Amino acid sequence: MTVISRMDTLPPVTLGTLLNGRVRYRQFCDGYRTGLEPVLMAACVPARAGQYVLEGGCGAGAGLLCLATRVRGIHGIGLECDSHTVTLGRANVSDNGFDAIRIVHATLPVMPGDPQLSGPGVRRIDHAFANPPWHDHASTPSPMPRRDRARRLPRAGLAQWVGSLSAQLRHHGTLTLAVPATLLDHAISSMGDSHLGDVTVFPCWPRQGVAAKIVLIRGRMGSRTPARLLPGIVLHHSDGTFTQEACAVLRDGQPLLD
């Protein structure tokens, strides 16, 4: 990964790749750094060509870029509260040639004024997804403001994010979340409160026999199908290398769920 000089007034960034080089991806040298979560989350979104997708708290666009690479022809909107990250995300979208994806400056749970987003009664989004901040607002703040915004959210904030994103979904549209296992109960109850059914829980096991830290959860608007707990995916062998199943998602861009 190489360090790139400043882009106009932005802090220094690094240039790397996602999906085994299929996605060019810049991110800031300091502050929040993209992990596995956005790539795994994007693999759970059941989008098809021509559909509209919405990501809350998209950062520099890793999740949207991975989804758009796997499913060509989608229309995407990413919402991000940090102005520098918005600029970087737009540059990443442009670098990868995705004309139908936009990064919009917005702070959830408030939705921006956008022609593809709407108030109650008019829903245009087929699939929404988010990797919300994981730490409670009472936890120790990061000295880096950008990293702190990406890490901390009041416990009630998760329900607000779920409510705001699900309010944009068409009937039977989906909402996918990547959350820590400690927030599993709260995420499921928040989906239920927002009329999302067919809740599917997909654990990501670090290694065989080790408790899952990351859980992917997907709900469907207006569905009455009961919840499901799936076997999930083991990410690493005992020696730390990725499993074949993990490589298929993280490098080859294969979906995790239908």
Image: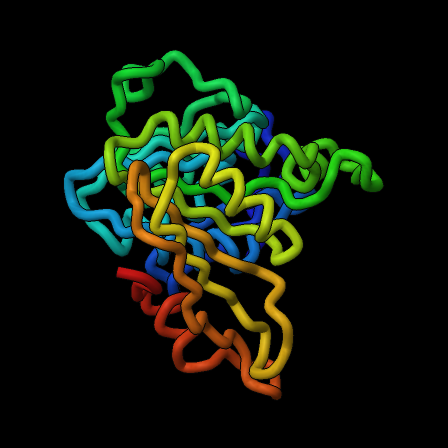
Residue at 44% over, 64% down:
229
Residue at 63% over, 72% down:
211
Measured as percent of width and height from the top left, residue 6 is found at 58, 36
In this orientation, which residue lies closer to the viewer: 39 or 170? 170
Q: Is residue 99 visible?
A: no
Residue at 50% over, 21% down:
106
In this orientation, which residue lies closer to the viewer: 46 or 2? 46
In this orientation, which residue lies closer to the viewer: 194 or 59? 194
Residue at 54% over, 22% down:
107
Measured as percent of width and height from the top left, residue 148 is found at 72, 36
Query: Farthest right residue?
Result: 140
Say which quarter of the image contains residue 31.
top right
Looking at the rendered structure, the number of numbered marks drawn on it comes to 0
Say which quarter of the image contains residue 210.
bottom right
Placement of the C terminus among the 4 image quadrants: bottom left
Measured as percent of width and height from the top left, residue 193 is found at 48, 34
> Compared with residue 205, is residue 21 higher up or lower down, i.e. above or below?
above
In this orientation, which residue lies closer to the viewer: 5 or 241? 241
Q: Is residue 258 visible?
A: yes
Q: Horizontally, is 256 left or right of 62 in the view?
A: left
Measured as percent of width and height from the top left, residue 232 is found at 45, 70
Query: Farthest bottom residue?
Result: 239
Placement of the N terminus among the 4 image quadrants: bottom right
> Compared with residue 2, is residue 90 higher up or lower down, i.e. above or below?
above
